[in-house]
Image: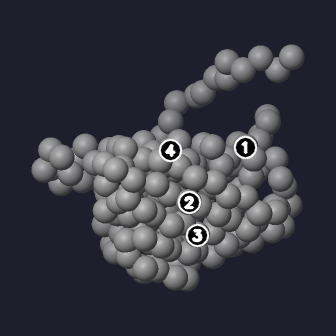
Amino acid sequence: MRVEGDRRFEAPRAAVWRVLNDPASMAKTMPGVEGFEIQDDRRWRANVKIPLGLGGLKMSVDMEKTEEREPEFAALRIKGNGVGAILSMTTSFALSSAGDGTQMHWEADVRRVLQPIVNQQVQHVLSALDEQVQEAQAGAASGGASEGVSPLASEAYEPEPEGPTTSTEDSS
């Protein structure tokens, strides 16, 4: 299944590039990350629990950057394994300046995964990415050092635990 789209960010291209190429920042955009390990500047792994209905699907997801042309293009290969599910995906993004902001065109070729998982998660990831870009832009504007793990550090990223969540969606 091939999916693609466009997204505009109210931040300069360099700021968007930094977030997209920082594995620790990207881990914050993925739903259900329970642990994150940076292997080197091109490879990292996330342990995730993808929320589905009453339960969730646990997966180990390996990501590898396969191509990079700073600050305009990058491509990744993603492989995930979990009980009853396998994920195989290639994805890329292209950035261009758009006035004071940045335009991103992204595409992904997803194989061996349930389509509802993809449809459910794409908007979540894009919204979380926008939040990370805005936080990075605010940190750069204030001149403060950003918090978190360096993308080249070998430490594992452990997100802060979240409290119980409730859904306000009406299922009728």
Q: Residue furthest front?
A: 99
The answer to which of marks 2 and 3 sits earlier in the sequence is 3
> What number of labels is visible?
4
Q: Is residue 62 left or right of residue 119?
A: left
Q: Write down the quadrant of residue 168 in the picture.
A: top right
Q: Write down the quadrant of residue 25 in the picture.
A: bottom left
Q: CA distance from mark 3 to mark 1?
A: 19 Å
Tag 2 residue = 105
The answer to which of marks 4 and 2 sits earlier in the sequence is 2
The answer to which of marks 3 and 1 sits earlier in the sequence is 3
Q: Say which amino acid is labelled 4.
A: Ala
Tag 1 residue = 120
Q: Is residue 103 above or below residue 46?
A: above
Secondary structure category for the residue under label 4: helix
User: Which quadrant would the N terminus be assigned to in this image?
Assistant: bottom right
The answer to whether residue 56 is visible is no
Q: CA distance from mark 4 to mark 2?
A: 16 Å
Secondary structure category for the residue under label 2: strand
Q: Say which amino acid is labelled 2.
A: His
Tag 4 residue = 128
The answer to which of marks 1 and 4 sits earlier in the sequence is 1
The answer to whether residue 29 is visible is yes
Q: Say which amino acid is labelled 3.
A: Ser
Q: CA distance from mark 1 to mark 2?
A: 19 Å
Q: Position of residue 103 (x, y in %)?
A: 46, 54
Q: Position of residue 100 (x, y in %)?
A: 31, 48
Q: CA distance from mark 4 to mark 3?
A: 17 Å
Tag 3 residue = 92
Q: Is residue 142 left or right of residue 3?
A: left
